[in-house]
Image: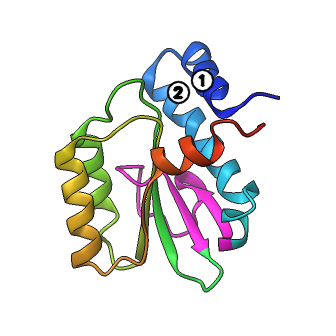
Amino acid sequence: MANFDELILRLHADYPEEHARGKAFERVCKWFLTEDPYYGQEFRNVWLWDEWPGRWGPDIGVDLVAETATGNLVAVQSKCHARTAPSQEIDSFISASSRPEFTQHLLIATSDITKNSETKLTHMASSASVAELLPSWAILMSDSANANL
């Protein structure tokens, strides 16, 4: 078993190409959202974008879709970068996830995001009355960094 930091290092070693690493990290995020004691109870379904029955086209910013216990849909973006996640990628998530079917948004990232991206996400949360905006790097790194995976 490895801890979270070891898992991320392994992803970077096994998938040096960013796109392939991102796809692998999406599967890790799906596993985390279904198996974590907290999130596993919060979500009754978690789909990779290509698995979600309601998808309207190719992945243009939303990587996963989670259905809450009450039936609401959460747009999820996962970012596995060694450095700060590029703001244009966060912008794509903001744009793609502002559709009416999504009532919440979740960002799962292994790195920091830019101050500009943080401001946009915060504004999106307040203007769209999003019930929960989670800077994933804080949750995953603090809650799971030393957890056995």
Real-space CA distance between mark 2 and mark 1, rounded to the nearest whole angstrom: 6 Å
Write down the residue under mark 1. Answer: 11
- View extreme (bottom): residue: 70
> For mark 2, does the 10 Å Cα neighbourhood hold few (<14), some (14 to 19), or many (20 or more) residues?
many
In the image, the segment drawn in magenta is: 42-67
| Colour setup of the view | rainbow
Residue shown at 42% from the left, 29% from the top: 81
Residue shown at 56% from the left, 45% from the top: 142
N-term mark: 2 or 1: 1
Which percent across, then down, holds residue 114?
Answer: 23, 41
Compare residues 12 and 110 and report the one nearer the observer.
Answer: 110
Write down the residue under mark 2. Answer: 21
Which amino acid type is marked by label 1? Answer: Leu
Which percent across, then down, holds residue 91?
Answer: 23, 50
Residue shown at 59% from the left, 73% from the top: 67
Q: Are marks 2 and 1 in contact (CB under 8 Å)?
A: yes
Q: Is residue 66 left or right of residue 124?
A: right
The quarter in which the N terminus is drawn is: top right
